[in-house]
Image: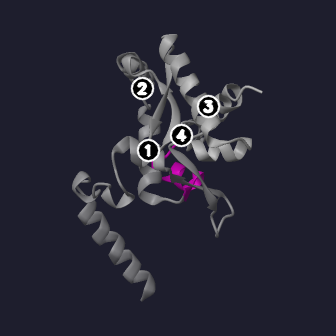
Amino acid sequence: MSLTRPIEAMLLMATEPVMAADLAAALEVPEVEVVAALREIADFYDDGRRGIELRRVAGGWRLATASDLADVIEAWVVADQRAKLSQAALETLSVIAYLQPCTRGRIAGVRGVNVDGVVRTLLVRGLIAEAGEDPHTGAMAFATTGLFLQKLGLDSLDELPDLAPLLPDAVALEAELGQLADQQTN
């Protein structure tokens, strides 16, 4: 049996570089045979001027887009970013980011409109995810994802800007809410 096909299939499914020893163990063949097959696959992609290549990286092997096509790939990825979020989606995402985990009802309360469609869009785009049920209402709560942080260039939610400077009457509103809370406890 030729090792190139199963090795190629395994590499296609791998999310990280795969060591030749791991491929050999999985296929139950000597590592030297796997290395020879890997070189054969790499040569095939190099000689055929294909859109992908087999690279040796981080101590393992990985299929990747051909390096000379970086400009094409970059243009394609950037073109995919054309689908900007609507104002409604940005507002909903902001509410979730600052109040998470929060339910559709809470988001709708803050925004003053139905948010079902916008929440679905944000879920599909992977910017938010279900974060369990609200303990009081049993409604599904939502939180931002790692992709949200990645797209905003943040390491954590702690890096979100403070809202107070963006809301001119925030200090007055906070003081008023504090007074109301004090009155209710007294």
Q: Position of residue 82 (x, y in %)?
A: 41, 22
The quadrant where residue 24 appears: top right
Q: Is residue 114 visible?
A: no
Image quadrant containing the C terminus: bottom left
Instruction: Identify the amino acid type marked 3.
Output: Leu
Relative to 160, does residue 47 appear above or below in the rendering?
above
Query: Badge 3 is on which residue?
Result: 12
Q: Residue at x 58, y 53 (%)?
A: 105
Q: Position of residue 52 (x, y in %)?
A: 51, 21
Image quadrant containing the N terminus: top right
Q: Secondary structure at mark 2?
A: loop
- Comparing marks 1 and 4, which lies closer to the viewer? 1
Query: Badge 2 is on which residue?
Result: 81
Query: Badge 4 is on which residue?
Result: 122
Q: In the orientation shown, which residue stands out farthest toward the bottom? A: 186
Q: Secondary structure at mark 4?
A: helix
Q: Position of residue 55 (x, y in %)?
A: 47, 31
Q: State if disc 4 and disc 1 touch (CB < 8 Å).
A: no
- The mark nearer the N terminus, 3 or 1, is 3
Q: CA distance from mark 3 to mark 2?
A: 25 Å
Q: How many marks?
A: 4
Instruction: Identify the amino acid type marked 4.
Output: Leu
Q: Which mark is residue 15?
A: none
Q: Which residue occupies the foreground of this view, 81 or 136?
A: 81
Q: Which residue occupies the foreground of this view, 90 or 148?
A: 148
- The mark nearer the N terminus, 4 or 2, is 2
Q: Secondary structure at mark 3?
A: helix
Q: Position of residue 162 (x, y in %)?
A: 27, 58
Q: How packed is label 4: few (under 14 Cα within 10 Å), some, or many (20 or more)?
A: some
Query: Badge 1 is on which residue?
Result: 58
Q: Provide the residue span drawn in magenta.
A: 102-115
Q: How packed is label 1: few (under 14 Cα within 10 Å), some, or many (20 or more)?
A: few
